[in-house]
Image (cartoon, helix red, strand yellow):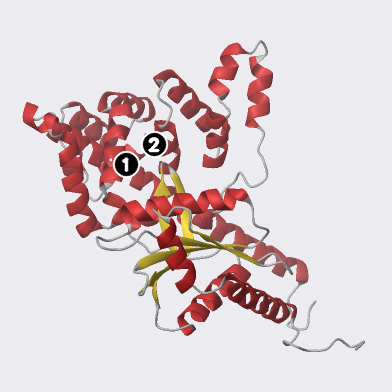
């Protein structure tokens, strides 16, 4: 018995029981949000398709409809309802049409509320009308989509219907996470199976999970698609050290003078179906351009330069306002003892502009020195030593 009078085994059992309950309910909450979100997007897609099919002139101006809806709905509902996402919802409904959903629900159901839902769907009643009854019918439709929305987004990239059905079926049967599904599609499992003489062995090998495949409930809730659906801002870093470095660098640049104006931190962007986060975005008043800053806790590689050019191309198309100069990138690599800073200036339209940028921007060595100093200070804090403290042997 411990000093507080509790039996160690009984207390440990109680603690474990509570942890199990909380972890299970967190996972269930993540699944529930994803299921309702996916059903909602299917309903939105259906409404768009039905509107387009309401007349030949509407079908003709389908893309204009998506653009207009994207602008209006984004203003009212948040960034998750832009034109790109709406087009994806429309494609989702077309790939999983109402007849297929009715068939799926019919195979599952035997209760009265489900029968009512099926009758209404078959009769062509609007899903938006169905969804008003305390969400019960929308919840019923969600049963037809047991995978998370990000999985259906990945499945939409598979053009062949047979291959898409195969990946969906295997993901359900084997319990694949989105990461596993992405890997199987990327490795062309469906095509390889068609050529394989030992399909069972290949499927067994494919079903083996890799480290990091399983998403934690926190990762599931922080899925960018979920955050967009709930219209929640997404600002977090992968590590405390990286978070602290970013904050220190932001403060350092602002202290250099009034040229730097802070725009945002952990700014998300989407290229195709992949999400990226830009660590810092500033606006340089004298150069009249955005400064895109990407921090890497490690050594500089050419892949980092390639990724920065993706960011710059995206920023030039989506973030740069009329009259502003092209954005410039700053890659910071905080490898222990060997910090580096690299400006990305080769995307500029001419050498004269690049030379002007070099003259006005802070010297790379100045930034490297600050990066090293800050990194060392943070490491010392993390290890419990005070900055500049001498060791016991000195």
Task: Write down the residue under mark 1.
Answer: 39
The single residue placed furthest to the front in the displayed view is 352
Q: Secondary structure at mark 2?
A: loop
The answer to whether 52 appears left or right of 218 in the picture is left
Res 298 → quadrant: bottom right
Crowd band around label 1 with a 10 angstrom C-alpha radius: few (<14), some (14–19), many (20+): many
Task: Write down the residue under mark 2.
Answer: 145
The single residue placed furthest to the right in the displayed view is 393
| Residue 26 seen | yes
At x 70%, y 69%, the residue is 11
- Vertical placement of 200 versus 158: above or below? above
- Vertical placement of 354 versus 95: above or below? below
At x 15%, y 27%, the residue is 123
Res 237 → quadrant: bottom right
Residue 254: image x %, image y %? Answer: 46, 81
The answer to whether 375 appears left or right of 56 in the picture is right
Q: Secondary structure at mark 1?
A: helix
The C terminus lies in quadrant: bottom right
Residue 32: image x %, image y %? Answer: 41, 49
Residue 152: image x %, image y %? Answer: 41, 36
Q: Nearer the viewer, residue 270 or 35?
A: 270
Residue 343: image x %, image y %? Answer: 53, 62
Res 57 → quadrant: top left
| Residue 55 seen | no
């Amino acid at each position: 018995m411990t000093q507080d009078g509790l039996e160690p085994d009984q207390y440990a059992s109680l603690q474990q029981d509570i942890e199990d309950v909380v972890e299970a309910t967190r996972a269930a909450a993540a699944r529930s949000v994803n299921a309702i979100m996916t059903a909602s997007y299917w309903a939105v897609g259906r409404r768009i398709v039905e509107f387009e099919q309401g007349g030949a002139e509407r079908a003709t101006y389908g893309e204009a409809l998506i653009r207009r809806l994207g602008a209006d709905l984004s203003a009212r509902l948040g960034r998750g309802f832009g034109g790109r996402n709406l087009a994806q919802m429309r494609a989702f409904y077309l790939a999983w049409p109402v007849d297929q959903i009715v068939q799926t629900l019919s195979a599952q159901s035997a209760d009265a509320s489900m029968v009512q839902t099926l009758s209404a769907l078959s009769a062509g009643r609007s899903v938006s009308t169905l969804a008003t009854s305390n969400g019960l019918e929308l919840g019923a439709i969600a049963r037809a989509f047991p995978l998370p929305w990000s999985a259906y987004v990945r499945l939409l990239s598979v053009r062949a219907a047979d291959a898409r059905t195969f990946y969906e079926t295997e993901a359900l049967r084997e319990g694949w996470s989105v990461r596993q599904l992405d890997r199987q599609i990327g490795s062309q499992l469906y095509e390889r199976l068609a050529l394989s003489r030992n399909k069972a062995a290949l499927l067994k090998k494919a079903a083996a999970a890799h480290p990091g495949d399983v998403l934690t409930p926190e990762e599931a809730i922080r899925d960018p698609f979920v955050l967009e659906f709930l219209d929640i801002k997404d600002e977090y870093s992968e590590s405390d050290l990286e978070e602290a470095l970013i904050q220190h660098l932001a403060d350092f640049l602002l202290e250099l003078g009034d040229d730097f104006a802070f725009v945002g931190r952990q700014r998300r962007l989407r290229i195709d179906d992949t999400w990226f986060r830009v660590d810092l975005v500033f606006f340089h008043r004298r150069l009249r351009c955005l400064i895109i800053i990407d921090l890497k806790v490690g050594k500089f590689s050419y892949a980092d330069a390639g990724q920065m050019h993706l960011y710059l191309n995206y920023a030039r198309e989506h973030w740069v306002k009329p009259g502003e100069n092209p954005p410039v990138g700053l890659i910071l690599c905080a490898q222990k003892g060997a910090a580096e800073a690299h400006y990305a200036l080769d995307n500029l339209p001419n050498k004269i502009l690049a030379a002007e940028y070099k003259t006005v921007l802070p010297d790379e060595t100045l930034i490297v020195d600050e990066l090293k100093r800050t990194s060392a200070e943070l490491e010392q804090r993390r290890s419990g030593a005070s900055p500049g403290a001498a060791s016991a042997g000195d």
